[in-house]
Image: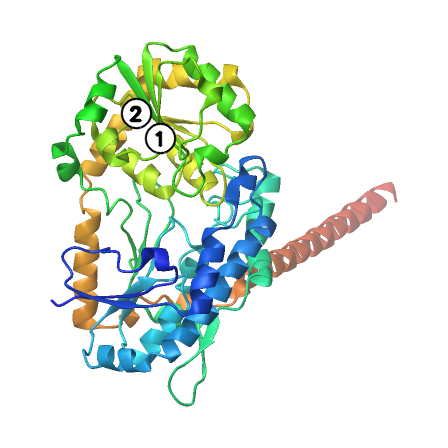
Amino acid sequence: MKYTFFTPTVTRKYTKINYVRSTKNVIHLEPSEKLALIGDKFQMSDPSKFWKQDSSIYEILPMIDTFFEMFVELIKVLEENLELLDNLKEENFDVMIFENIVPPAYSVLDYLQIKTFIPSTSIAFDNSLLYSIGEPFMPSAIPFFFSVPISEFSDRMSFSERLINSISIPIMNTFLPKREFKSFRPPYSFIEMASMEPLSSFIFTNSNPYIDYPRPTLEKNDQIGGISVDIEKLRNVKVDEKWDRILNLRSKAVLISFGSFMLSKDMPLEYKKALARAMATLPEVTFIWKYESDDTISFAQGIENIHFSKWIPQTALLADSRLSAFFTHGGLGSVNEVSYLGKPTILCPIFADQMRNAKMLARHNGSIEISKYKLADSNKIEEVLRTILFDKSYRLASETLALQLANQPMKPKELLLRHAEFAARFGRLPSLDPYSRQMSFIEYFLIDIAFVGFISLLSISFVLVLITKRTFSFIRFILSSAFKRKID
């Protein structure tokens, strides 16, 4: 099977990056000046406020607005490069796989007239996409990504949390921009994502049933979480001499990284000081801290067991048996990696889906969640560090989860390839499209049946009460008559 990778660039920083190795036919599309400026604007946005601020939907909305501004301009760039799309159209592709949150992909799909497509998500749970394809809707037990505040609920919710989780979808649909763009072909009608999504053959979601909350899913939903984690390859990768020396310094080592978006250098100073103080109380442990600045790190002055580095070989370190634990923000990439590699983890979610990811992983008992607001408390940090390092139950639980993932019946990569090839061969699959998604709210939740049942029960109860009343009246009349005759 021949593969083509089409990558319209938004930010020039990522131009010509080789994202794929085995796919030889890679086609880049340069951004316009305006698109590049919007991309740079998004890159320069300051997320550091979320270190000390909740990430409610109202705080995320400006970032979403920038996203959609980006998409509108990307549509214009694609329109100005229809010749390139015409060349792609000549390839007569069997199937198209794309990131679902990017609406211009549907315009490309429409122009290339590819009937078979597979939307994909980089997050574990896209409630909008899953709702569109008819997957069961369970706000009572499944926390949604756009709960307010975002993703802070687990599967065990209180009444107020269930209420908020239930109304979060209508709120999101009210505030988010409408997801539709014009076709590049006459009559240039609007393409609405919500009506297109159910026509997909399958969807690929970045979740894993052995990690995520258990829930009813459709056969159409292929969960490929962890596809980027190549266990066999990582086991054979050795860290270089520098990291080998650092890992050999002490009997235990902890890796600290808050990802590539939320940077340690932007952390409030009191958080940095508290973390450093907590690490100083564990001189027998080496702490490797991803810190993105060359500035003098005065808050850790004199603490010899902390090693700062602007870049770290994260997966190689996580795969190394000498690393004892991982302290991270709970990004989905890190969660998948640490789950597959079986390392005890301290999860400190900062914003967005990290809240949901942290609770999702913590329920497996191999990790501990700590609030970002506790990072100023060195005693709390020390307590959590000592627990994750010296309580063997966390290591055993994390290794058990890793063993399950290593032996899951169908590996994520195999799952993706088989379903992509199946879709390319058979096209759209109406047999996987549940009729339930076309039912009204009243029909779907059997409210009409419950109403009829209630009325029937009420009617039967009324008749029974009436019969009972008449019976007692008749008995009373008989007894009264008999008593009267006896008196006479």
Compared to 453, does 229 lie above or below? above
Q: In this figure, which residue is indicated by the disc labeled 2? A: 397
Which quadrant of the figure has residue 434?
bottom left
* Label 2 element class: helix
Q: Residue at x 39, y 64 (%)?
A: 133
Residue 397 in view of the camera: yes
Please rate how many residues cluster around mark 1, counting C-alpha atoms within 10 Å: few if below 14, some from 14 to 19, many from 20: some
Compared to 85, does 154 lie above or below? above
Disc number placed over residue 364 in the picture, else none:
1
Q: Position of residue 319 (x, y in %)?
A: 21, 30
Q: Position of residue 196 (x, y in %)?
A: 39, 72
In terms of depth relative to the viewer, which is nearer, 120 or 21? Answer: 21
Residue at the bottom extreme, as displayed: 187
Asked whether the residues under the numbered discs 1 and 2 touch, taking CB atoms below 8 Å apart as contact, a structural biologist would say: yes
Q: Between marks 1 and 2, how big is the CA–CA gap?
A: 7 Å
Q: Position of residue 85 (x, y in %)?
A: 28, 78
Q: Position of residue 129 (x, y in %)?
A: 41, 60
Please rate how many residues cluster around mark 2, counting C-alpha atoms within 10 Å: few if below 14, some from 14 to 19, many from 20: some
In terms of depth relative to the viewer, which is nearer, 295 or 140? Answer: 295
The amino acid pointed to by label 2 is Ala
The amino acid pointed to by label 1 is His
Q: Residue at x 48, y 21 (%)?
A: 298
Q: Residue at x 54, y 60 (%)?
A: 65
